[in-house]
Amino acid sequence: MRTRREPRVTGVRFEHRRASDALGIGSARPRVSWITETDAPGWRQAAYEVEVCDGRGDVMATSGRVASDESVLVPWPAEPLASRQRRQLRVRVWGTDGGESDWSEPAAVEAGLLDPTDWTACFVSPDPDGPAGAADDEAEPPTTAPTLLRREFEVAGPVERARLHVTALGVYEVEINGTTVGDQVLAPGWTSYDHRLRVETYDVIALVRPGANALGAWLAEGWYGGRLGWNGGQRVYGHRLALLAQLELTLADGTTQVVGTGADGTWRAHAAPILASGIYDGETYDARLEQPGWSSPGFDDDHWRPVHAVERDLGTLVARTGPPVRRIEELRPVAVTASPSGRTIVDFGQNLVGRLRIAVDG
C-alpha cells in the first residue's frame, strides 16, 4: 500500500520574484508566497508559520501559527529591511486534515538601495548636450550611436561581498574585467521612463579581485532613445543616453569601497563597434572597430573622451519586480533562400525575437 507523504512547502517567493532571484528587492517589507506540494486529495491549508533568520541562522522573528489558507503575498512578519540587508526565511504549513509540513528550505532575500540617499553615483552620458547639440524639445533629434564606457579601479585586498546596482536611460550591458555581468538582455527593459526607471542588483563577487580591476558598459538607445511606432515612428522619451552604476565592495578586513559613475574624470567613453542599434531596425556592426580588452585593466583609453553628468530624480528609481528579458532558446534555420533582389532570407520557421549567430570568413 502506498504511503501518503506529508505536505511539502516549495517555491518560496518574495513579492513576485523567486528566492533564487530575490537580490536587490525593492521593498522593506517584501511579501511572501509559496507552493505546497502534496498527494493528499482535496488537501487545503489551514494555517501557516513564517520564520525569519539572520545570516547566521539565528531566529529574529516569527509570525507564529496563523490560521489562514493564504499562501500568496503574505505579509512580512519581521522588522522592515534596511537597504542592503539580507535575511533568510522558512515556511511551514498545516492542513485541514491535521497534517503538518516540515520547514521549507531556507530562502534568502536581500534589499536593494531603498532610498535615493543610498546613491553616491550619478548618471553619466557620453554626450554633453545630446546628439549634435539637439535640444530636448526637438521632434526628431539625431540617433545616438551605441557607446562604450569604462573606468579602472584598485581593490586593496580580498573581497567578501560585491554588489553592482545599475540602470540606464537606454539599454545597457555591463562587463567587469572582461566578463559580462548577469544573463539579461535589453536591461532595464521598457517602462514609463518619465515616472520610473528599474534598477538591477547583481552579485559580482566572482568577477572582482584584489589589485587592478575595470568596469565597462555598453550603452544604446533601446526603447528610451529609439523610435517607436509605424511609418518612421517617433521618439517618445529622450535621446541623451546615460548610465548609473554603483559597485559596492566589502573587503575581508571589514572596510568598504564604492565605485560609482561620475563626471570626475575616472570614466571615459568611446564609440562602440555597433554603429546603429534599434528595437525595430536591428544592428549595424563593424568588427573592424572592436577594441580588444576595453573592459579589462591596463587598457589604454587616453584617446577616449570624458563623460558628463546628467540630472535625474533618483526618487524615480525602482527595483525590478518581474522576470527580465533573457535568452531562453536556440533555433536553427529551416531554410535559407535568396530574394529576387539578391538578399539572403533566413527562415526560422516561426516568429521570434532574438539575435543571429553567424560565422564569417575574411
Image (tube, rainbow, N blue to C red):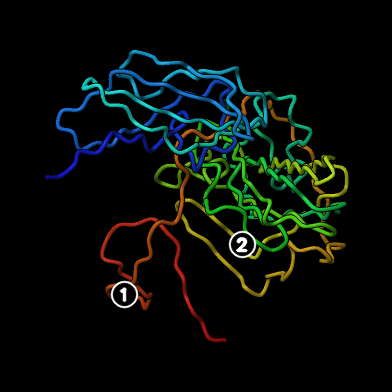
Residue identifier under label 2: 275
Q: CA distance from mark 1 to mark 2?
A: 26 Å
Q: Secondary structure at mark 1?
A: loop
Query: Is residue 335 found left or right of 265 in the rendered image?
Result: left
Q: Residue at 31%, 77% (x, y): give it.
A: 336
Q: Amino acid at mark 1?
A: Ser
Residue 161, percent across and down? Answer: 71, 45
Q: Quadrant of the C terminus?
A: bottom right
Identity of the residue furthest to the top in this view = 67
Q: Position of residue 45 (x, y in %)?
A: 27, 22
Contact (Cβ within 8 Å) of mark 1 with mark 2: no
* Position of residue 58 measured from the top left corner of the image (x, y, whole percent): 61, 29
Near mark 1 (Cα within 10 A), the count class, few <14, some 14-19 or many ≥20, is few
Q: Residue furthest left?
A: 1
36 on left or right of 168: left
**Image-quadrant location for residue 114:** top right
Seen from the viewer's position, the closer of residues 237 and 80 is 80
Write the residue at 54% across / 20% down: 29
| Residue 63 picture location, percent across and down | 47, 16
In the picture, residue 92 is in which quadrant?
top left
Q: Residue at x 64, y 51 (%)?
A: 219
Q: Residue furthest bottom?
A: 362
Residue sitting nearer the eye, 70 or 360: 70
Residue 339 has which mark? 1
| Badge 2: residue crowd in 10 Å (few <14, some 14–19, many ≥20) | some
Q: Nearer the viewer, residue 184 or 239?
A: 184
Q: Is 90 rendered above or below residue 360?
A: above
